[in-house]
Amino acid sequence: MNLHNQAVQLIQVRMKEIGMTQTELAKRMGWTPKHVNRILNGFAEPSMASLDFMAFILGIDLEVTAKVPGEWGTLITPGER
């Protein structure tokens, strides 16, 4: 499962937890419901900024950890310095 799919899955779980529809999420984001639907159903691959915005609207944080096996270990994101 790639990074986008994992983020979308977390977003879908959170939407279900708080009872938010795709239409309501789209309205809060200023996007069309069709665009949100395409992202959540895998027909569009959004930027990480878009996924982060969706998560923000839903009250969750998306964190990305990069790792180079055997060399660098875990890298921090810019906000963690």
Image: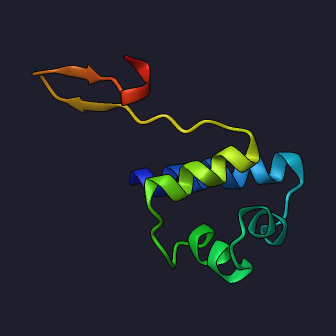
Foreground: 77 or 2?
77
Identify whether 29 is placed above or below 10. below
Q: Position of residue 54 (x, y in %)?
A: 65, 54
Q: Is residue 70 left or right of residue 39?
A: left
Residue at image coords 49%, 53%: 49
Residue at image coords 28%, 24%: 75
State the residue lying farthest toward the right: 19
Residue at image coords 60%, 73%: 41
Q: Is residue 33 left or right of residue 38?
A: right
Q: Position of residue 2 (x, y in %)?
A: 39, 54
Q: Quadrant of the C terminus?
A: top left
Foreground: 73 or 35?
35
State the residue lying farthest toward the bottom: 34
Q: Position of residue 38 (x, y in %)?
A: 59, 78
Identify whether 60 is placed above or below 23. above
Identify whether 58 is placed above or below 71. below
Q: Quadrant of residue 40?
A: bottom right
Q: Is residue 46 left or right of residue 27?
A: left
Q: Quadrant of residue 20?
A: bottom right
